[in-house]
Image (cartoon, coloured by chain):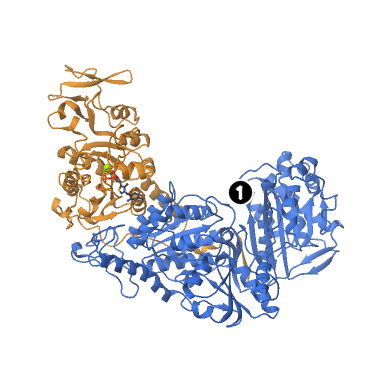
Amino acid sequence: MTTESAVEPEQTVEKLDRVTIRFAGDSGDGMQLTGTQFTRTSAVFGNDIATLPDFPAEIRAPTGSLPGVSGFQLSFASSDILTPGDQPDALVAMNPAALKTNIGDLRPGGLVIVDEDEFTDSNLKKAAYISNPLEDGTLSKWQVARINITRQNELALEGLPLPAKQKFQSRNFYALGLVLWLYGRSMDTTVKWATDRFRRNPDVLDANLRAMRAGYHFGETTEIFHHRYEVPAAEVQPGTYRHISGNEATALGCLAASIRSGLPLVYSSYPITPASDVLHELSKFKAFGVKTIQAEDEIAAMGMTVGVAYGGQLALTGTSGPGLALKSEALNLAVMTELPLVVINVQRAGPSTGMPTKTEQSDLLQALFGRNGDSPVAVLAPATPSDCFIMAMEAFRLALKYMVPVILLSDGYLGNGSEPWRIPAIEDLPSIDHHYAKPVDDSRKFNPYERDPATLARPWAVPGQKGLMHRIGGIEKSGQTGDIAYDAGNHHRMTLARLGKVERMVQDVPPVEVTGPPEGDLLVLGWGSTYGAITSGCERARKAGKRVASAHLRYLNPLPANLGEVLRNYGKVLIPEMNTGQLSLIVRGKYLVDAVPFNKIAGQPFKIAEIEGKIDELLGLTGPFEFQFGPASVLGGG
Amino acid sequence: MTTAITGSPQGADEAIPVLTRKDFVSDQEVRWCPGCGDYAILAQMQKMLPELRIPHENIVFISGIGCSSRFPYYVETYGFHSIHGRALTLATGLKTSRPELAVFVITGDGDGLSIGGNHLLHAMRRNIDITVVLFNNQIYGLTKGQYSPTSEMGKITKSSPYGTVEEPLHPLRIALAAGATFVARSIDRDTKHLEETLYRAATHRGTSFVEVYQNCVIFNDGAFDSFADKEVRQERMVYLEHGQPVRFGRSREHGIRMNGYVPEVVRNAPGDGGLLVHDARDPNPVLAGILVEMRYPDFPVPIGVFRDVEAPTYNDLVEEQVANARAKEAADFEGLLRSGETWEVL
Ligand SMILES: Cc1ncc(C[n+]2csc(CCOP(=O)(O)OP(=O)(O)O)c2C)c(N)n1
Ligand code: SF4
Ligand SMILES: [Mg+2]
């Protein structure tokens, strides 16, 4: 591999196991791109990676303003990592607003790189700084690198036939070059990517590459930095890797389900943050026969999905919390008519519109119970971005096997977060079976509610099949004939049968696995996107000699058969959730275990340190744990 | 790897057997009130269906909730009695995924225009190839007699003992505004006209919208008698025929002509000269719009096909996109997984 770094560094090189960097700037400054490129470079280098992008809620907040700040955090390491890091070790702040909203998260002693040129009176005012933080001692806790990014970028681009405004937009490449140098990374990955991305726009390509090289070479020649850092490659399983976000993985998993089942996929959805990317992805897959319908609202999207399932194809809809609320009545129709379909809910902070770009796990009870009547559905939750691929397939497998709607609970943190993913071979993917009903000689004798004794699934008789014409609907039906029935015994039996299908699914649910000692003082139980923080927090606690285990639920209805037994093997059970205690309510109610809820409802994922802090409290090592919420920061907040 | 997916279930393409009305009668006991207009619509539908020569198992009836929405139970086809207002959404999903099916939607004035009004607009704007029959009895039948969005201003009902203070919605006006490509009206008591209209609707490609005036004997009896009663029908209704002058009366002696953009009645019009000639194929919906606004007692009430134009259907366009994409791109899943940046770990 050729490398564009010609000069050997003169600065000392410090070896680190893990580094967390945050890039922050105005939403127009291209920080997502800078972060993504650094991520790719580190992944290609062989680090393990976790990322957390964060966008402002407004599409175009005023330039330089606090609400306009956009950030991207990544952690890269020489060992397996599960979260994008609690506190950044380094912060790149492209303007005063970015500094203001992010500096509170930087670890004491950490490095902050600022574009000094942007610290003008007017920008300081927009960021509500009374005096210049670069001058007034505000930053004394940190190492500050003041760099004239704007001016140096301008110089590097001198002579290029581009308007000044466009040249200004290459600043992020300058910053990227500088940081690549700082961490001993090659520019190759970005050169390759940019050459393709800007191939139709050679001047812009030239500008960006020149800016990046200028930043890189500035690092080499300047004496501002006394250290460079090196994070060696991690030991990971051999194979071909790529980056994948949760939403991409969800879309690909659904496509994989289509391929493995042989059933065409139809996705009906109404755009909503943070689920829209699933629609964007799936709408590209036309060559695989995937159809996407942008419905007029979420009610329509759900109804269409019921129609698709009735027609015998792979029926999928997706949304976020407010949309799930709208879908509930039509979803209930699928419960009643026992049709197989999958509902993706990429959860966000609620209630109501809440905080669309912020993550939360507060739709668990809505997913489990948010419909009229006794209305059981299966509920699954992926644990990491790439797990969305596996769980999307699993959702379809179970839906088809048991003729039950399945809700897949992702969240904004999983959906937008990404991680390296070892690309699977098709033949290693699970096969997904489906069975249409067997025709009978006279359709007047066909009973659409005659159940399979093992799964209680009813037959899937789809229009176009001869000899199986029948009527179904939201009205209660006789289990004997499929006709409308209001008699008491029938409703009792049918309600239990609908419940029984979800209960029997437990035979397909793997037992919950424990990481750490099989019995001990404390079990930390989680579900969904808290996996990384919980697992890492418990690992650290064990390293410190504490008898703490963790377990993670990817199946929330039905729960794994061994869960009750596992819970009883520990003195205490702690349940961290990004809600006010929804899984805790279920666990306490179902297993009569005195589980302790640990709730963070800040629109942000748990930090490892927070899990550790709470563990210490429960083990009696410290007093009550309290969250340290910082000022309104973009990403961290703690 | 290339992956081909086809989803149609087995069967369905042998020669189509000749069916009769009886083949479309299900074994379910019909539960409408005696004398309800729904019976007539059911009978004409059952009579019309065999004429379509569609494989029996490819016909699907989808309804919402209401007296009218009980319809699918009584027709021996695939049937789905869904939830209030949402039949069109199921139909859209079904037709998009299985375009070879013939999909009928049965809805009421409350089901289709109140709770489900939004879906009606969007189905018609997409021009998805389904047939929508809206039973307009200008009342909520199933919930026992509240006013509906088509009830006339001042109507006294259980939920409006002092009379309503709301203007009614005119279904065909909505259909034209939403760009429906087939817009028609018929009435329960004119069985011949009803059957013909249903047939034309079912054979049209694109969204066909048929409003059927339907008498609810229990909660809104006689709602249409003022113009549809046998005695007065010829004088007070006008049967629209494409390419023909708009004429009515016992011996078609009266006509309609345009005065600027305002229609007027010509009593005892001697010849056809100057009379309005109906053109259902006009791509411009303005003429249909003028006819839709004719109401008794100022005008005879028009029934028939107001608009019948050709336009690409949603489901055809969806199929075309898929076919084009398949012709141009390989369905290479492993390639897709590897698209973008990848790296090897040895
Ligand atoms: C979500 C919901 N809201 C209300 C109802 C009650 N409901 C059932 S049918 C109906 C009105 C039916 O009127 P229409 O569509 O005109 O049908 P008709 O009975 O007159 O044929 C109402 C309000 C319901 N079933 N579901
Ligand atoms: S209530 Fe009216 S619409 Fe309903 S079945 Fe009886 S007559 Fe027909
Ligand atoms: Mg009605």
Residue B327 shows in the view: no
Q: Determine which quarter of the picture holds residue B184.
A: top left
Q: Determine which quarter of the picture holds residue B147.
A: top left
Nearest the camera: A397 or A8? Answer: A397
Instruction: Classify mark 1 as within 8 Å of ligand 1 or not, answering yes or no.
Output: no
The chain whose colour is orange is B
Residue B138 shows in the view: yes
Q: Is residue B216 left or right of residue A136?
A: left
**Residue visible at 31% across and 43% down?**
B110
Looking at the rendered image, the quarter that the N terminus of chain A falls into is bottom right
Give the total number of marks visible in the rendering: 1
Callout 1 amino acid: Ala
Q: Is residue B177 left or right of residue A127?
A: left
Nearest the camera: B287 or A259? Answer: B287
Is the residue B54 above or below the residue B291 in the image? below
Image location of residue A198, percent across then percent down: 64, 49
Image location of residue B135, percent across then percent down: 25, 42
Crowding near the residue tagged with mark 1, few <14, some 14–19, many ≥20 C-alpha atoms within 10 Å: some
Image location of residue A405, percent across then percent down: 40, 63
The chain whose colour is blue is A
Residue beneath disc 1: A57
